[in-house]
Image (cartoon, rainbow, N blue to C red):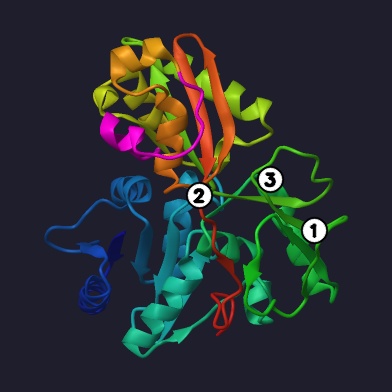
Amino acid sequence: MRASLIAFTERGGALADCAAAELERLGWRADAARGWGEGKRELRAWTAEAFAGSDALVFVGAAGICVRAVAPHVVSKLTDPAVLVLSEDGRFVIPLLAGHVGGANALARTLADRLGAVCVTTTATDTRHLFAVDVWAKSQGLAILNPGRIKRVSGKLLAGGTVRLYSDWPVAGKAPRGVEPVPEGPCDVRVTAGTGDAGEALILVPRALALGVGTRRGVAAEAVERTVRAALAESGYRMEAVSGVFSIDLKKDEPGLLAFCAARSLPFETFPAEALNALPGTFSGSDFVKTTTGTDCVCERSAVLGARGGPLRVRKYAADGVTAAAAEQAVSLQFEEETAWED
């Protein structure tokens, strides 16, 4: 995690250095820039660089300076970095942007605690100590498929209503106030890897599938994408549910496969034929594949091994010189006793 800090006075600079040191103690990479005097960074250029390359921006000074600086770069609450303001006297920490998914609220609370400041949080669910579904989704590693419905869920809680949550996997722990886990039927939040109709629900997708892929030499990334999409769709799964890509070690340098993984920021792991062959179970074997690779089915065996023995959910699908399969890996979900939306 990287934090970029900037201050505009000597006093603010000392505070920025202190805050950066505290963040580094917590495992962040943090650097403080000078917005004044010798070595001054031009604010517009600094902001553009920091917004694109940092997980958090901290402005030590007036909130108005911060707002004007970041305004041209704001895109989405799901992708923007956390943006905070520290008052120059060190009394207040104010999260201004990406409070939930971006982590600004949590970071503000951390800095306030470390610096002896007051955290000024303005998001309604936080001020009223209510369940913040986007914070929970982030903490559980869930992809938010239709973020426009976050507001509907939060609005229902703020109005004193009950949010019905359905999950394809058990959710451990006690549900927060205003949240009712339901076993079936209409719901406000659905945790699923499937493509079925979720009605008006906010859809949260866990990284539940290990994707096994085999390819002919020289296959393009576009062919991998098409085949994987078709394989998942045929079995009723979403691409967002893929946690990683797995194959035989013969394919560890395959350009099209590497490009596909890079484009989707998916980890890529390969296994030797001996490890694939050691898996018990019935797979869609091919004598030709075994002759050329040393194992009878690259995609299915790689998927199961990638899922640490999890069950096959998508059987071998072949097209355009690519084979794809997917296995389900363990998914652990919980309502935490001390959650990110509680002070």
Between disc 2 and disc 3, the foreground one is: 2
User: Is residue 225 in the magenta section?
Assistant: no
Rendered-image quadrant of the N terminus: bottom left
Q: Residues within 10 Å of mark 2 (few under 14, many from 20)?
A: many
**Residue reaching furthest to the left:** 38
**Which numbered tag is attached to residue 329?**
2
Coordinates of residue 148 in the picture (x, y in percent):
71, 48
Q: In the displayed structure, does residue 312 sit left or right of residue 41?
A: right
What is the spatial separation of the Cα atoms under label 2 and label 3, in whole angstroms?
Answer: 24 Å
**Going from the N terminus, do you reach mark 2 or mark 3 first?**
3
**Mark 1 lies on residue:** 188
Q: Which numbered disc, 3 or 1, marks the residue that appears first in the sequence?
A: 3
The answer to whether the residue labelled 3 contacts the one labelled 1, judged by CB atoms less than 8 Å apart, is no
* 3 or 1: mark nearer the eye: 1
Instruction: From this view, report whether residue 300 is shown above or below residue 85.
Output: above
Mark 2 and mark 1 lie on one chain; the one further toward the N terminus is 1
Picture disc at residue 301: none
Residue 266: quadrant of the picture: top left
